Image (cartoon, coloured by chain):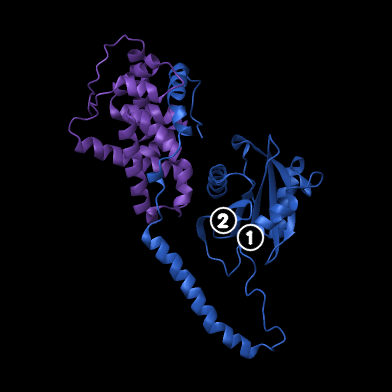
């Protein structure tokens, strides 16, 4: 196992982390911790799905971060800088999306994002998050419904996150 | 990747997420994320190097004593390693316009049967369509220890990849995924119980890594 094999997956990890955490610095810290942990766990890797392995490590790091931060993901989003960082879409759209995402429970957000961004199958998600496929499916459908409601403005947007 | 997917009723949300976050993929990777391999990894490499050196140092004088001195400078003690052989074969055949393969992909069944018979092992041909590569066909090559199969793929822009498959020789032990660069050819290779595999191409390392991951999966899991 060689670190050079992991490098191609860094953009994927960063994209997912950005959507999961919400702010750039927090997301990159999550990626950094994930990479360092992966290097420490090299000896546990067996040739196989490297992407799923890396995402499962990121999941563990993320869960630990949630546990250590009692506040959960109740992060103040700086609207100006966030929108400036994502130039291809209009500011309001991204803000709405980012807020709506933060309105999902973290475990729903993980499933929704792995499927949408990484195009993972239920089986891939189940492996990456260490949960049964049935749970993947129910979290996905509940998460998507909630995301849609939040996006459509049917639900009052609360930045306060429902922690699991 | 996704097999259990229904027609997506959340297409709109998915598209919004992709539009919002895909740009992150092309951001430059922060320098701090380029980590080093763990120390034990480097020690292990160094140890292999030192042991090989010691081994050769001890063995060569003995060999010299036994062998008649006609060839005092044995050019090579061992055959070139798998990635080197694979890269050479890639360089020889991939530029071929008219005869890149001996047996065309149209006769894939025949190709697989023939090569399996010659290598005396059940070969499988990975499908890389999702990665943008179509099978062109394959050929039989002489290897260090007997016949070798080479499958060639090509993408829409004419870029080619070869998968080089040889029976594992007694001298080789199974290895995990490895990367090697032979001149301008990048090679990912690994050795399992029966075979050594090397995927070669003049494509960038990250793209090749992804294809290699898919090849590995299809060969090991089917």
- In the displayed structure, does residue B10 sit left or right of residue A96? right
* Coordinates of residue B78 in the picture (x, y in percent): 62, 72
- The picture places residue A122, in percent across and down from the top left corner, at 43, 32
x 69%, y 88%: residue? B69
Query: What is the spatial separation of the Cα atoms under label 1 and label 2, in whole angstroms?
Result: 8 Å
Q: Colour of chain A?
A: purple
Question: Which residue is tagged 2?
Answer: B180
**Residue B214 at what x, y percent from top left?**
55, 43
Which quadrant of the view contains residue A123? Answer: top left
Chain letter for blue, please.
B
Please give the residue where the numbered disc 1 appears in the rendered image: B84
Question: Viewed as shown, does residue A107 lie left or right of B71?
Answer: left
Residue at 50% across, 32% down: B2
Taking the view exactly as shown, the residue that stands out farthest to the left is: A70
Q: Would residue B122 be seen by someone viewing this image from the given angle? A: no
Q: Is residue B195 above or below residue B46?
A: above
For the residues bearing labels 1 and 2, Cβ distance under 8 angstroms: yes
Instruction: Please indicate, yes or no, whether residue A7 appears anywhere in the rendered image.
Output: yes
């Amino acid at each position: 196992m060689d670190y050079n094999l992991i490098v191609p997956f860094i953009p994927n990890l960063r994209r997912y982390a950005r959507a999961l955490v919400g702010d750039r610095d927090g997301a990159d810290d999550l990626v950094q911790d994930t990479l360092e942990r992966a290097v420490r766990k090299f000896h546990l890797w067996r040739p196989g799905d490297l992407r799923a392995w890396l995402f499962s490590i990121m999941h563990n790091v993320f869960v630990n971060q949630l546990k250590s931060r009692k506040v959960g993901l109740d992060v103040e989003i700086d609207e100006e800088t966030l929108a400036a960082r994502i130039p291809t879409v209009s500011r309001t759209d991204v803000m709405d999306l980012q807020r709506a995402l933060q309105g999902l429970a973290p475990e729903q957000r993980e499933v929704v994002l792995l499927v949408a961004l990484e195009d993972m199958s239920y089986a891939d998600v189940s492996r990456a998050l260490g949960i049964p496929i049935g749970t993947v499916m129910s979290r996905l459908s509940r998460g998507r419904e909630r995301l849609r409601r939040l996006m459509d403005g049917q639900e009052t947007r609360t930045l306060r996150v429902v922690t699991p | 990747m996704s097999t259990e997917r229904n027609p997506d009723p959340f297409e709109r949300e998915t598209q919004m997420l992709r539009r919002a976050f895909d740009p992150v993929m092309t951001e430059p990777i922060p320098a701090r994320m380029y980590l080093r391999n763990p120390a034990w990894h480097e020690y292990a490499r160094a140890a292999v190097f030192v042991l090989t050196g010691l081994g050769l140092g001890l063995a060569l004088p003995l060999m010299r004593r036994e062998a008649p001195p006609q060839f005092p400078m044995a050019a090579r003690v061992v055959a070139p390693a798998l990635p080197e052989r694979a890269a050479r074969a890639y360089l020889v055949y991939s530029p071929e316009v008219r005869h890149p393969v001996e047996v065309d992909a149209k006769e894939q069944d025949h190709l697989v049967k023939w090569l399996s018979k010659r290598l005396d092992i059940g070969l499988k041909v990975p499908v890389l369509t999702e990665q943008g590569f179509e099978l062109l066909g394959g050929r039989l090559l002489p290897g260090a220890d007997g016949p070798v199969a080479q499958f060639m793929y090509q993408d829409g822009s004419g870029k080619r990849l070869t998968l080089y498959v040889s029976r594992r020789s007694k001298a080789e032990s199974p290895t995990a995924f490895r990367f090697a660069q032979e001149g301008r050819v990048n090679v990912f290779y690994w050795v399992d119980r029966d075979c050594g595999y090397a995927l070669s191409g003049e494509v960038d390392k990250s793209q090749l890594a992804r294809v290699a991951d898919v090849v590995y999966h299809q060969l090991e899991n089917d």
